[in-house]
Image (tube, grey):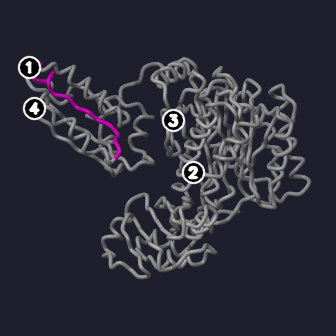
Amino acid sequence: MLQCLRFSEAERQRLLAETEVPSQVVAAFFRVAPGDDSRAVASVLLDEISEFGELVRVTPDPGKPALESEAARDYLIVAIIPITAAEAFEDLLRRPSIERRATSSWEDRGDLKQLFDAGVTPQPLPEEEDPEDLLDRARKFILSNGGSTYLNSHSEPLPHAAEERLAILTLPKGFRASGVRCGIKGRKYDLGILFCEGLPAVSGRFTRNRFASGPVQLCRRNLERHSIRALVVNSGNSNAATGERGHRDAERMAELVAECLGLEAHQVLVCSTGVIGRFLPMEKIEPGIREAAEELEVGRDERFIQAMMTTDTRMKHSVRAFQLGGREVTLAGATKGAGMIQPNLATMFAFITTDAAIRQSALDQALGIAVHQTFNRLTVDADTSTSDSVIAFAGGAAGNDPVGADHPEFFRFVDELRELCLDLTRRLARDGEGATHLVRVAVEGAFNALEAERVAKSIANSMLVKTAVFGRDPNWGRILMAVGNSDARFDPNRVRVWLTGMLLFENGMGTGQEPAEVSQAMGHEEVEIRVDLGAGEARATVYTCDLSYEYVRINAEYTT
């Protein structure tokens, strides 16, 4: 019956993918009461569930073909909804106009996949629309009501067979992207180009590792010229610790992109990630750049995103839409990173595009605020890499009046950028090497913000805490150990500790909470550790993941 809804392959993957907010796929058969307009009831139900659900589909029950008069009253509805909205979904089906209902739900996407696989081959989809027309219609539809809306916010498994078109960084007007297989990683995508058709404001934040790679140093120099138009990225080789030759290779990459796109070399940024200490295979990269420059287009971002990935298991991206200066604005981001992630950036790239018009100084300030409050509060394994980069392009094609730091809507833009970066940060933590849990460490009651952040990082970086989360062990002693190892000021007798919302420690001793109950709650995909120091009003939140056997295997087998 799911096949009768004719989900596209991309929609099927979306149904089967895990979402950031714990979610479930729900299906309900319902019968409209006699005397009610069945189509109207179904239409209203579709609209109401769409307010909190995704991929909502309503269709006459495909399993009731016998009597048309009866079949017209029987419907099937399918949607992805947050688990917290399950009761709201049921309530909508308890209205007088619905006389009968039967519901099912799937949190385990494996069970749902079996249902899809058991069905018949889907009917061919209609001919694909022109990407520009499709994107324009999507923008108008999503932005028609104003305000701020998540257009797309999720991680996607890497495609195995036919690729699905993905518009993320090219969803804002004025951007094109490409990705190719040049041979650094065999048959995988490993080189990509992002290009802005106008002259954007561009800002960047980079690793503080003293062995910063040649590409990072080139980016810092070129950004000072305030004329960036393009970015080239490769994975599989970080071009770090490669001496003068590494610097020349990075410069050659910029020159090649410039030659192909009619730019100057100083208008190109270069980002490389992968194995440290090996020279770039320029005999593969040079033809790869020429190929990527020829294939720049809108709506094939999945190739670009895969081209920057190393040990990542999923593509990670997010899009927001909002009004700025009365104009429709889109803000998009894509990121990579799975290991060697520690605050101040580490083995992670985040590339951000927007069609908003933002002055250079304002973009610098906004990105600095967003990075400090999001990416710099992320840690997977406490190691800082040599190549990390967060780069934001503001192309201005939306047509709003340029926003400066003194503009009344500047902090609206800052808020949207921060939310985008926070969403990407959470996805990075969730996709940490071998991770099975996203861990949110929230510290409050600190003497000042700096001490709150130090305590949160001490907890998040503790191998004992991370392994306890993996083993679902409610060992609050490990959390106290990490708190005590920080140099924050507090009275131990005033400290309180919660794990998954359950108070485990206060007044200098354990609360006697039943360990089995806490352990069961730790089975959720996201686990929260909360600490109140009782020393002030400051607070900080840091994101990390657990530490599993798989992390050891990945890093034992992967050449850094």
Residue drawn at (21%, 28%) of the image: 62
Residue drawn at (59%, 70%) of the image: 458
Q: CA distance from mark 3 to mark 1?
A: 47 Å
Q: Amino acid at mark 3?
A: Ala
Q: CA distance from mark 1 to mark 2?
A: 51 Å
Q: Residues within 10 Å of mark 4 (few under 14, many from 20)?
A: few
Q: CA distance from mark 3 to mark 4?
A: 43 Å
Callout 3 secondary element: loop
> Residue 31: percent from the left, percent from the top?
13, 30
Q: Amino acid at mark 2?
A: Thr
Callout 4 secondary element: strand
202 or 260, nearer to the observer: 202
In the rendered structure, find residue 162 and report the number of the disc placed on it: 3
Judging by the rendered image, the residue that carries numbered circle 1 is 35
331 or 357, nearer to the observer: 357
Tell which circle, 1 or 4, labels the residue nearer the N-terminal end: 1
Q: Amino acid at mark 1?
A: Gly
Asked if residue 73 lies left or right of residue 518, the reply is left
In the rendered structure, find residue 99 and report the number of the disc placed on it: 4
